[in-house]
Amino acid sequence: MLAANLPTRDRILADLATAITTLDGPVIVAGDFNATPYTPAFRDFVHAAGVATFRRLPATFPNRLGDAGLPIDHVMVRDAELAALQALPSIGSDHRALAATILLPPG
């Protein structure tokens, strides 16, 4: 991601956190956030949105580095359990896809 785009990414994360707080029930948020879990704007997003992610984040970018890459694609939940998360082999993208097992509360 270009440094010039970082303020836009950070604003999108803040706006998304605000939108998530208005939702009722379980929430699943997934995608390419172009941010590692150590990025301040990402940490702020996770806290503000009240979402949780998996304890071990698999590397997803660039796919050619496999497990040595960066975890910038994420799956997060609120009012649900993220029971498993793994990176899958690439099928043409420069990112590795994620497969998540999410347990929703009975209801």
Image (cartoon, rainbow, N blue to C red):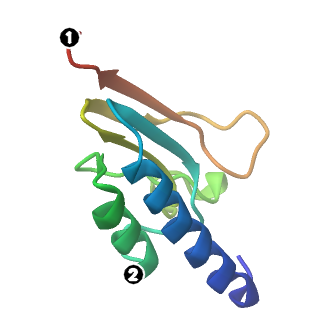
Q: What is the three-letter code of the residue carrying label 1?
A: Pro
- Whether residue 19 is visible here, answered yes or no, is yes
Could you say whether the residue bearing mark 1 is in a helix, strand or loop?
Answer: loop
Residue count near mark 1 (Cα–Cα under 10 Å), binned few <14, some 14–19, many ≥20: few
Whole-percent x, y for residue 14 in the image: 50, 70
Residue farthest along the right direction in this orientation: 92
Residue 79 versus residue 88: which sits nearer the camera? Answer: 79
Q: Would you place residue 39 above or below residue 65 in this image?
A: below
Judged left or right of residue 106, residue 76 is right
> Which secondary structure lies at badge 2?
helix
Percent position (x, y) of residue 75?
43, 43
C-alpha separation, residue under disc 2 versus residue under disc 1: 34 Å
Mark 1 = which residue?
A: 106
Q: Which residue is mark 2?
A: 40
Furthest residue in direction bottom, as rendered: 4
Quadrant of the rendering where the C terminus is positioned: top left
User: Where residue 23 sits: x, y (%)?
Assistant: 41, 40
From this view, report whether residue 33 is shown above or below residue 35.
above
Picture quadrant where residue 82 is located: top left
Image vertical order of residue 3 relative to residue 94, above or below: below
- In primary-sequence order, the first of circles 2 and 1 is 2
**Residue lying at 44% horizontally and 60% vertically, measured from the top left:** 17
Three-letter amino acid code at the position of disc 2: Pro
Q: Is residue 71 visible?
A: no
In the foreground, 74 or 50:
50
- Mark 2 vs mark 1: in front: 1
Q: Is residue 62 left or right of residue 76?
A: right
Q: Residues within 10 Å of mark 2 (few under 14, many from 20)?
A: few
Any mark on residue 64, and which? none
